[in-house]
Amino acid sequence: MASFLPSSLLAAVTSLMVASCSIRPDQDVYRMPIAQVSSWFEKDELTLNTAGGKIPVSVTTGDGSRPVLLLHELNGQTRGSLALAHELAQRGCKVYVPRFFGVFGNDKKQGVLSLILPGNRWHMFQCETGPIRQDVREIAAQVMALHPGQPLTVIGNCMTGAMPVELLAEPGIDTAVVCQPALPVGRSSGDGRLGIPQEVIDRTVAAMKKNPHKRLVSFNYLADSFAPVAGQATLARSTAAAGVGARHLLYIGVHAEDPRSGADYDQLATHPGFRPVPVEYREPAIRRHSTVSEASEPDVTRYRERLYSALGLPAKVPPSAGRNIR
């Protein structure tokens, strides 16, 4: 790896492998047989063709009618992300979880090297993110085609965190969830880049202004050193300036010891959608990263409660939906 990566990138990759979405959450799903986790999904995976090749997609079972595209984090299609898909399905959603690399139920850091090797479709260190954005757009279009006339919700996590912002500009997508956007890798705390160009953000904000049904929902730890909250502040500035801030909810995890000062915090705290969430996970700070799919308890429950509320879903699982995993 050192033969083709400069020392600065090598350091960033090392940080990436250590600080990726690897917090082992206190969720029952991590103690379940993989066969039980598999039972939440249709036996035959969906295969979608994109410019980058064939992408396998796990689809939740049940008769959920609300389509949701759930994009996984750096660790792959982990049990945490699959559990989130299951909980959404219990609340009436039909959830599609593409697998960009690794295996079903993966909880390793597989795929990190494949994401940085030459020729891959993920440009992890660039704001443009790479050709993978086209693949994700094509996946979203094909999922929408399976649910004609129904608006699609898209949830991004970590390396896919900012991708829903771009998709929200599409006519058939009404809700984008931006969770811990970690690209480009190596951002400093004051770096407001978000893994997508500003002109893409501007296009999406313009679509929000034109269509009152479009909404953004953001999740971020205030003191995240891997996915700096400055990226969410960039979104907040754009939505507030366009007068659509009320439709941009900002669930920011704030620890009791986090400083409440600085340009980013001021931008967030004065935004009409600001919703601070008390969190308890703090050390080591670089690992305070994952949220709705992989965070530790009690943070993961608190974030998911806000997610379901923002999406208009029931807080509790209806009795007919079966037992919740937690």
Image (cartoon, rainbow, N blue to C red):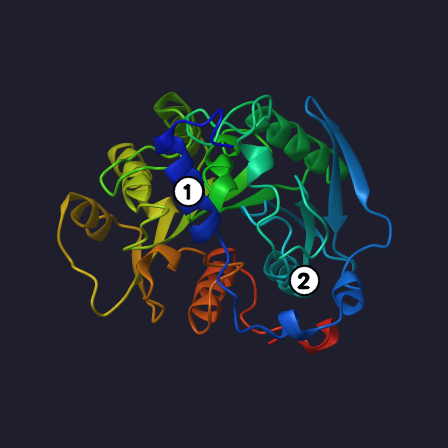
Residue at 20% in and 45% down: 264
Q: Nearer the viewer, residue 92 or 258?
A: 258
Q: Is residue 181 visible?
A: no
Disc 2 residue crowd, few under 14, some 14–19, many 20+, Cα 10 Å: many
**The C terminus lies in which quarter of the figure?**
bottom right
The CA distance from mark 2 to mark 1 is 24 Å
The extreme left residue here reads 261
| Quadrant position of residue 254 | bottom left
Circle count: 2
| SS for callout 2 | helix
Residue at 67% in and 62% down: 86
| SS for callout 1 | loop
Q: Which mark is residue 182?
A: 1
Q: Which mark is residue 153?
A: none
Residue identified by numbered label 2: 86
What amino acid type is highlighted by mark number 1? Ala
| 252 versus 229 height, above or below | below
What amino acid type is highlighted by mark number 2? His
Disc 1 residue crowd, few under 14, some 14–19, many 20+, Cα 10 Å: many
Residue at 72% in and 71% down: 321
Q: Nearer the viewer, residue 173 or 55?
A: 55
| 154 versus 304 height, above or below | above
The extreme front residue here reads 3
